[in-house]
Amino acid sequence: MKILGIESSCDETAAAVVENGKTVLSNIVATQIPFHTMYNGVVPEIASRKHTEWIFPVVRQALGEARLTIDEIDGIAVTNRPGLMGSLLVGLTFAKTLAWSTGKPFIAVNHMLAHLYASHLAADIAYPYLGLLVSGGHSIICKVSGFDHIEVLGTTIDDAVGEAFDKVAKFYGFGYPGGVVIDRLAQNGNPKAARFPMPAIDKQNRSGSADAKFARDNPHYYDVSYSGLKTAVINQIDQFWNPAFERTPENIAASFQETAVRIILFRLFRAVEDTGIRTVVVGGGVASNSRLRALLAAEKDLACVFPPPALCTDNGAMVAGLGYQYLARGETSPWSTIASARVEGFRKTGRRSS
Ligand code: KG4
Ligand code: ZN
């Protein structure tokens, strides 16, 4: 079965054709980065307009590179959640219209499940495993027991990890997208130049009494927080800087990146310990971070799987691969499927769970 996958949840207009959930026949990503760079971040209105302009040529190119016509496609999969509403709507409406007008099966998929599936395009991975989903919008530690079945153990209570990279880079004028620039600057910096604090959201037990030890029954035991780190790097850097080091962009980047990566790995290692699951599959844009990869590679008793770099950031191949799995099970989505900016449980923004 050959599935056309369409992705437009943020700032990449992407389409791909994947055969039997495994073989990538084409993978076209039209990045809008140059259009958002001058604003140091994604401007939703510009993103939707570019998707509208590009979606048709990108899909046509994906079919062309796979040397297929639309008649030879067995199903059309698209991201319908979570993401920027206006951006999601373009891909979803296009995919629905194409599927309806050609009489093809239509499958709407969850973007974060697609990020997890990216690794399955390049390797055979057995369930269950722990998923580490790190992107511009999400920081999720989950137990994965099937392509469509995850149990979220921990998530962010405020900013996502990629968002923290982007905001720090924006403040210091390092460039855009922040994660890529900070990763590059950090190669020539010293992570010991500043010692930023780790969040302590997991330090109290359920009764609320302060406990010297981290409390396993704390509802935030696997959760992360990045707003404190962001504030420390942006507003309180003097407080945490080691005066023995020069305040260079490289040193700021390296110190921030070290803490950002360790915050989430600390929680991930707790989940490994508690579940006994020793396979970790990483997905999302931050999965290409070199420090995250190095620290995970150093964990010799863990089997860590990363998608190939081209499949870390948003792409249509992961959407097509995941779509195939639903279709192989005989499932399609109704025409009434709508776009959703959020998915329940993926973020705890604005509320503290108890
Ligand atoms: O998955 P993605 O393309 O889009 C979302 O679903 O959000 O992830 C984009 C995020 C951005 O925040 C970007 O700064 C971050 O991934 N990113 C990185 C790196 N490459 C991209 N963060 C850290 N290190 C990188 N090398
Ligand atoms: Zn993404």
Image (cartoon, helix red, strand yellow):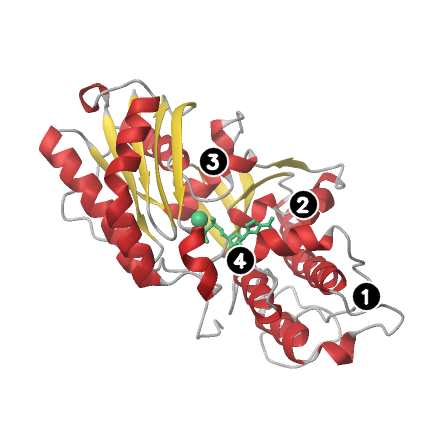
Closest to the observer, 131 or 58: 58
Mark 3 or mark 1, which has the lower sequence index? Answer: 3
Which of the numbered marks, if any, corresponds to residue 118?
3
Kind of residue indicated by mark 2: Ser
Decide if ligand 1 comes within 8 Å of the CB at mark 1: no
Q: Does label 3 or label 4 sit earlier along the sequence?
A: 3
Label number found at residue 193 = 1
Element class at badge 1: loop
Q: Separation of disc 2 and disc 1 at Cα?
A: 19 Å
Q: Which residue is painted at 78% across and 70% down in the image?
A: 247
Q: Nearer the viewer, mark 2 or mark 4?
A: 4
Q: Are marks 3 and 4 in contact (CB under 8 Å)?
A: no
- Which is more foreground, mark 3 or mark 4? 4
Which badge, 2 or 3, is on the more N-terminal residue? Answer: 3
Amino acid at dot 4: Tyr
- N-term-proximal mark, 1 vs 4: 4
Q: Which residue is mark 4?
A: 176
Quadrant in the picture for residue 189: bottom right
**Residue farthest to the right, as pictured:** 244
Q: Is residue 235 left or right of residue 160?
A: right
Judging depth in this view, the residue of 18 and 52 nearest the camera is 52
* Disc 2 CB within 8 Å of nearest ligand 1 atom: yes
